[in-house]
Image: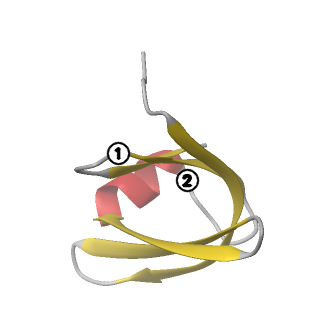
Amino acid sequence: MISARNRFAGKVKSIELQDLIGKVKIQVPPPIKITCVITKEAVDELKIKKGDRVTVFVKATEVMILK
């Protein structure tokens, strides 16, 4: 169970992959852009691609993406 109070539905605007890291830029209303830095492995496992609808979870210590 995920228990983050701050959830934002958004759309993936871009993905930049490096050796081990992926920068996923997500646009959420009103338009706000959030950049999440996650492992390349997580990008691959979630099969995130540009244009996908995702949910961003923001906690005091981390940001999570749910597809």
Classify mark 2: residues with Cα within 10 Å, few (<14), some (14-19) or many (20+). few
Mark 1, residue position: 59
Q: Quadrant of the C terminus?
A: top right
The x, y position of residue 42, in whole percent, is 36, 53
Callout 1 touching callout 2 (CB < 8 Å) = no
In the displayed structure image, the side of residue 40 where residue 45 appears, left or right: right
Q: Position of residue 25 (x, y in %)?
A: 55, 76
User: Which element is circle 2 on?
Assistant: loop
Instruction: From the image, tell me which residue sits under label 2.
Output: 47
Task: Give the vertical position of 61 relative to 13 (above or below).
Answer: above
* Nearer to the camera, 52 or 61: 61
Q: Is residue 58 above or below residue 14?
A: above
Question: Left of 52 or right of it: where is 7?
Answer: left
Q: Where does the image place residue 55, in percent across and percent down from the top left?
A: 61, 46
Q: Does label 1 or label 2 sit earlier along the sequence? A: 2
Mark 1 burial class by Cα count in 10 Å: few <14, some 14-19, many 20+: few
Q: Which amino acid, mark 2?
A: Lys
